Each structure stands twice: as C-alpha cells, then as structure tokens.
C-alpha cells in the first residue's frame, strides 16, 4: 500500500495567487492537499495534466444543509470533488471548543456523504467513541506536544501508540502520525514506528520541504 501523505495548510495563504503558486509546485505529489475551504474549488481549476494530488477539507459540519450560518456540509464538499476531510483536529478542539460528541457526529456525516474522514486523536478514548463508524476511517495520531510546536514526538513512543491504536481498530485502517514532521524525520515514523502515512502542517507550506517529505517515503 502507498504511504498516505496529507498536507494541512491550516489557515494560511491569504491570496489566490499564493495558493496557485504553491499548488503548482506540489500538485504532482500523490498527496492529499487540504487548503482552507475558500480555495477548494480553485484547486480543481488549477489542476493540469501533471496533477496527481487529490483534495481534502480541514473540517465539515454534521448536517448536509439548513439554517446553520457559516457551516460547510459534507455533501457540498463531496459534490465539489473533495475526497477526504480532517475531523477533530486538536486546534479545533481547542479554539472552536469542539467536543467528542460533535466530532462523532461529523465523522458519521462525512462517511454518509461518501467522504473519507481523517479522525485526529491525541488519546485513545477519542478513538473509542467512534468505534461504530470505524470501518472507513483514517486515524491520525497527533500528540499535542508535537502539533505546531516544532518538537516532534519520540519515535519509540509513537510506535507504542501505533501498536495500541492498531489493536483497537484492527488490521485494515490506515493510521497516520502528525506533529512537527519534516524531511529529516518523516521516514522514521513510517519505517521505525510503522505508521502508513503522515499528516503534515507547517512543512506542507514549504514546497521544497514537502516534496522532500514525499520523496523520503516513496510517493
Ligand atoms: P505541524 O501540524 O506539522 O505544523 O506540527 C500538524 C497538524 O496540525 O496536523
């Protein structure tokens, strides 16, 4: 199976021109690119013959339509050609006060709309809540001490967490590691810790670094 690399651009890139330039440089990686919502449709217009990447959203709501000002529904994303959606990112749990109950609803709605949810967890209890919809999930272990800090998590400790997650979810699911990934540490989480992919934040905004990450894990 190919390693799954997911680029989380977070709330960055303030102009369409910047988005266009970054996309042009990374589009021929076989990654999942998750831009801010407002750029998702632009990315489909920027696609060319060289494009190998697919798109993902950084969040979605749990209803498909209705009086929910400001929300973006899983069905809207699906109909735009988006394949993946990040759900339960620790930054949303912190700043938007997303609860486990909200996240469980989002995972269910994303699956019903035909999206592949990437469920971010920093502890096992967050995973156990979604066990009923576990079949088609991608799970991303993102330890809080490593997300956005520049302090990657100890590979041996990550390997132990990988083993525990694998015990819970069974053999089939893809499990990612995320948190301060760069071109020099990417490979160790795959080869030493056993993860099937990586969720990359800050380094995904630097095209050279991002391409080097992808190359280091063979995609
Ligand atoms: P980081 O972010 O690579 O900047 O630590 C990872 C993430 O938030 O998914």
Image (cartoon, rainbow, N blue to C red):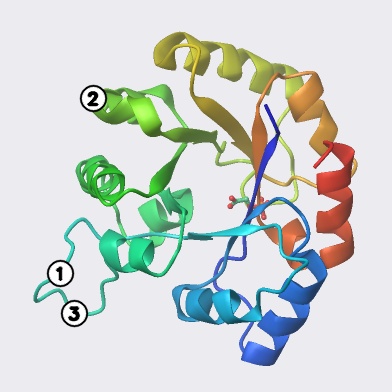
Kindly identify the residue that appears in the image at 45 percent across and 64 percent down: 81
Name the residue nearer the viewer: 48 or 144: 48
Under tag 2, what secondary structure?
helix
Q: Nearer the viewer, mark 2 or mark 3?
A: 2
Query: What residue would you read off at disc 3?
Result: 69
* Above or below, comparing residue 58 to residue 102 in the picture: below
Badges 2 and 1: C-beta atoms under 8 Å apart? Answer: no
Using the rendered image of the protein, determine whether residue 12 is visible from the camera's viewpoint: yes
Name the residue nearer the viewer: 48 or 148: 48
**Which numbered disc covers residue 132?**
2
Dot 1, crowdedness within 10 Å: few (<14), some or many (≥20)?
A: few
Dot 3, crowdedness within 10 Å: few (<14), some or many (≥20)?
A: few
Considering every residue shown, the one lying at the far top of the view is 167
Specify the quadrant of the image occupied by residue 185: top right
Kindly identify the residue that appears in the image at 79 percent across and 18 percent down: 192
Real-space CA distance between mark 3 and mark 1, rounded to the nearest whole angstrom: 10 Å
Dot 2, crowdedness within 10 Å: few (<14), some or many (≥20)?
A: few
* Above or below, comparing residue 60 to residue 167 in the picture: below
Kindly identify the residue that appears in the image at 75 percent across and 27 percent down: 190
Relative placement, left or right, of 14 versus 29 is left
Residue 111: give x, y in percent of width and height. Answer: 30, 43
* Above or below, comparing residue 84 to residue 160 in the picture: below
**Which numbered disc covers residue 65?**
1
Q: Is mark 1 within 8 Å of ligand 1?
A: no
Real-space CA distance between mark 2 and mark 1, rounded to the nearest whole angstrom: 24 Å
């Amino acid at each position: 199976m190919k390693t799954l690399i997911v680029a989380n651009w977070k709330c960055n890139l303030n102009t369409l021109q910047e988005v266009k330039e970054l996309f042009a440089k990374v589009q021929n990686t076989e990654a999942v690119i998750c831009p801010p919502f407002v750029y998702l449709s632009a990315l489909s217009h920027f696609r060319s013959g060289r494009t190998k990447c697919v798109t993902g959203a950084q969040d979605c709501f749990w209803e498909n339509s209705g009086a929910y000002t400001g929300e973006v529904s899983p069905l809207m994303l699906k109909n735009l050609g988006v394949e993946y959606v990040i759900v339960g990112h620790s930054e949303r749990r912190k700043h938007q006060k997303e609860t486990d109950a909200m996240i469980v609803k989002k995972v269910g709605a994303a699956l019903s709309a035909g999206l592949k949810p990437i469920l971010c967890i920093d502890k096992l209890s967050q995973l156990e809540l979604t066990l009923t919809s576990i079949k088609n999930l991608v799970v991303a272990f993102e330890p809080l001490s490593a997300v956005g800090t520049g302090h990657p998590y100890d590979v041996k400790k990550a390997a132990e967490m990988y083993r525990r997650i694998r015990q819970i979810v069974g053999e089939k699911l893809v499990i990612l590691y995320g948190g301060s990934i760069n071109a020099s540490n990417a490979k160790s989480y795959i080869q030493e810790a056993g993860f099937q992919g990586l969720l990359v934040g800050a380094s995904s905004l630097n095209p050279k670094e991002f391409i080097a990450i992808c190359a280091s894990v063979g995609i």
